[in-house]
Image (cartoon, rainbow, N blue to C red):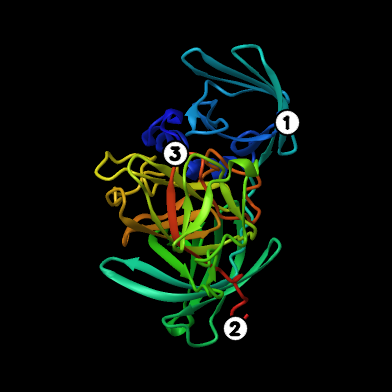
Amino acid sequence: MKKRMIVIGAVVIGTLWGMASTSVLADSDPLVGRWDMTILYPDNPRISWLGVEKKDGKYVGLLLREGGSPGKVGEVKLEGSIVKWEWRRGKQFLSFTGTLKDGKMEGVRVDHEDNKVKWTANRFVRKLNVTGKWKIEFKAGEKTRTNILLLKQQGDQIIGKMLRGKGKGRGIDIADAQLKNDILTFSATFTGKGDKTRTMSYKVKVKGDVLEGAAANKQGREFKLSGQRERKWGEPIELFNGKELDGWKPMGSSRDNKWKVIDGIMTNTGHGANIVCNRKFQDFKLHVEFKVPEHSNSGVYLRGRYEIQVEDTYGKKLTHNICGAPYGRITPTQNAAKKAGEWQTFDITLIDSYLTLVHNGIKTVDNQELVGITGGAIDSDEAAPGPIYLQGDHGAIYYRKITITPAEPPAVPEGL
């Protein structure tokens, strides 16, 4: 992604867009949440994004235009079914006006030159399924205790059992299980010596294959817990065979295509077309080996919507736009980039909206949420599977291995 598109720092994203509070409000508030937008240019619709939360009685938001990073907008106003907001940067100006109904918005955008274009937006609704076998660890003082949680979800109905220790025995049925947005709640009643019972209430956030939250007893004492879902993986798929570009096609005009295979390397020889694979994936692990020439720039797009920056940023300041960053969304824990001209690796895991990234053997993003698309997304349907695509419109770049391992859907565990 070009540097000229950078508009805000990572601190703004972290402080303004607090998803923990937003998920609760989104149940009852028609505007709070994540909105996947499409700007309806007649010749070439473009993708945008809006995030809205409520603070001190007012709606505030972040806007991702058609590229770059998200930036603050002025107050988002809702009057009846009419929604309005503005974005300004220097002399640039965008004014959005639309109607809101049943999780959809549509309206007109006007820029500083009085150009008008229609837009639509769909509220992002996470489609979670907590089915599976989860290893649960409780923190009780200095001790850590382990249980096994078995869950089966069909539509809105969730049943399950809690097994003590390593999971032996019949287990205890859970009760009152509910999943709202990404918050799972349930209770379990344990029987101890003398037939004494103890009921625990659980509230956890579902973060891909991870649970984070707490259990509380009737006296209100809480015990922090975390959980990891047992996950099975399919067979690895080589998206690049080292010989030709079978399974890949340029995006846009083929006249701009600069992609070739040279000495077994997938090579973009200069500023030209992006390239996309012809298969789509939902949850997966992805291994990428790449080399960046001096001052060059590319990107690996996950599901075609989330860019992992590929750029010559060795030794540069840590930002949300360096090599290995989910562009404009998450700042890695460190700059793990190698010098220009050296081979580098990404090992990426994407489950739901949660990303883990290991850059050159160093974990720099640890199961963090992608709260929306990045600039250059091919569409705004975040809940759908999507392809891998590679940027070629910023300069020369080299890829020698691209291996994807799809996640198998969680199966109903034995015992339910």
Please tell me which residue is depicted at 73% across the width and 31% down the height of the picture: 43
Q: In the figure, 20 relative to 143: above or below? A: above
Camera-nearest residue between 369 and 1: 1
The disc placed on residue 276 is none
Q: Which residue is mark 3?
A: 328
Q: Which quadrant of the figure has residue 147? A: bottom left
Real-space CA distance between mark 3 and mark 2, rounded to the nearest whole angstrom: 42 Å
Please tell me which residue is depicted at 51% across the width and 45% down the height of the picture: 391
Secondary structure under the numbered disc 1 in the rendered image = loop
Residue 416: where, in percent of width, then height? 63, 80
Residue 152: where, in percent of width, then height? 63, 71
Please tell me which residue is depicted at 55% across the width and 57% down the height of the picture: 352
Residue 1: where, in percent of width, then height? 46, 38
Question: Which of the marked residues, 2 or 1, is nearer the chain's N terminus?
Answer: 1
Q: In the figure, 172 relative to 111: above or below? A: below
Left or right of 107: which side holds 307? left
Left or right of 113: which side holds 317? left
Q: Which residue is mark 2?
A: 414
Q: Marks 2 and 1: which is nearer the front?
A: 1
Real-space CA distance between mark 2 and mark 1, rounded to the nearest whole angstrom: 53 Å
Left or right of 99: which side holds 90? left
Say whether residue 27 is visible: no
Q: Residues within 10 Å of mark 3 (few under 14, many from 20)?
A: many
Q: Which quadrant of the figure has residue 128? A: bottom right
At label 3, which amino acid type do we have?
Answer: Gly
